[in-house]
Image (cartoon, helix red, strand yellow):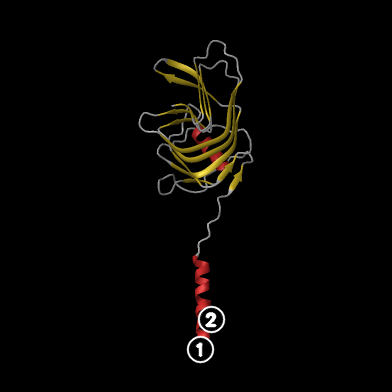
Amino acid sequence: MKKQLAFLILTAIILPIMLFGCKHTEPPQTDVWDGSVATAFESGDGTKNDPFVIKTAAQLAFLAAEVNSGADYNGKYVSMESNLDLNHLEWTPIGNGTYSFNGIFDGNGLSIKNLKITNGVHYIGTYAAGEHARYTTGLFGTCKNSIIKNLTIDQADLAIHNVSDRHEIVAGVLVGDLRTDTHTEISNIKISNAKIIGNFKVEGVLTGLKVGGVAGYI
C-alpha cells in the first residue's frame, strides 16, 4: 500500500512538470492589410539586438512611409515576425528614388502575399551622364547598400503603364532599383505566382527597360 501510494504521489508530481515543461510553439500568424498605415513599429530601436519589429501589414506600410519621407534607415535592422497579406490593395514601394531603403530587412522565413502595384515610383535620377526620368516598381522601389533576406513573396501582380515620358523603366518583384557603393546582399528570397505586365507606348524617349523576378536592376 505504501509503495502504491508513493507511486501515485510521484506520478502526480512528474506529470505536471512534463506538461508545463513542453514548450508549445504557435504557428506564425497572418495579418491581412486593410490599407491603413501604422504610426509606429511593434517594438524595437533598430539595433541588431533590438530590431524594429513588423507584425502587421500596416507596420510594413509605415516603413514605406518613413523611408519615402526621408527617414534615415542606414544600418538599421528591421525584423518581420508575422506573415503579411497585402490583400490585393495598392502598394506604395519602399524607397522612391529620392530616398532609398539602406537598412537590413530580415523576413525570418515568413511570407508576403497578394502584392499589387499599378502605380510605381516616378523620379529623376542624377548620374554621370546627366539626369534621367526613371520609373521603378517592386515591394522595394529603390535600395542602396541594403541587406534583404529570408523572405517569400507569393502572388504578386505588377503593372507598368503611363510611363511614356520615362527614360528608363525598372521593375522587380522584390526590388526595382538596387544600388551599392559598399555592400549589398540579397539572400534566401523565394518568389512564386508573380507577373509583371507592361502596357505602354514607346515614343522615342525610352532608353532602357530592365525587368527581373527578384530585382529589375542591380
Q: Amino acid at mark 2?
A: Leu
The answer to whether mark 2 and mark 1 are in CB contact below 8 A is no
Q: Is residue 30 above or below residue 144?
A: below
**Residue situated in front as seen by the camera: 24 or 161:** 24
- Residue 24 seen anywhere in this rendered image of the structure: yes
- Residue 38 seen anywhere in this rendered image of the structure: no
Q: Mark 1 sits on what residue?
A: 2
Using the image, tell me which numbered label, if any, was put on residue 8: 2
- Count of marks placed on residues: 2
Q: Amino acid at mark 1?
A: Lys
Percent x, y of residue 217: 46, 25
Percent x, y of residue 70: 47, 32
Residue for point 53% across, 89% down: 1
Badge 2: few (under 14), some or many (20 or more) residues near its Cα, within 10 Å?
few
Which element carries disc 1, helix, strand or loop?
helix
- Residue found farthest to the left: 182
Cα–Cα span, label 2 and label 1: 10 Å
Using the image, tell me which numbered label, if any, was put on residue 70: none
Which element carries disc 2, helix, strand or loop?
helix
Percent x, y of residue 83: 56, 45
Precedes in sequence: disc 2 or disc 1: 1
Q: Is residue 218 above or below residue 8?
A: above
Q: Quadrant of residue 187?
A: top left
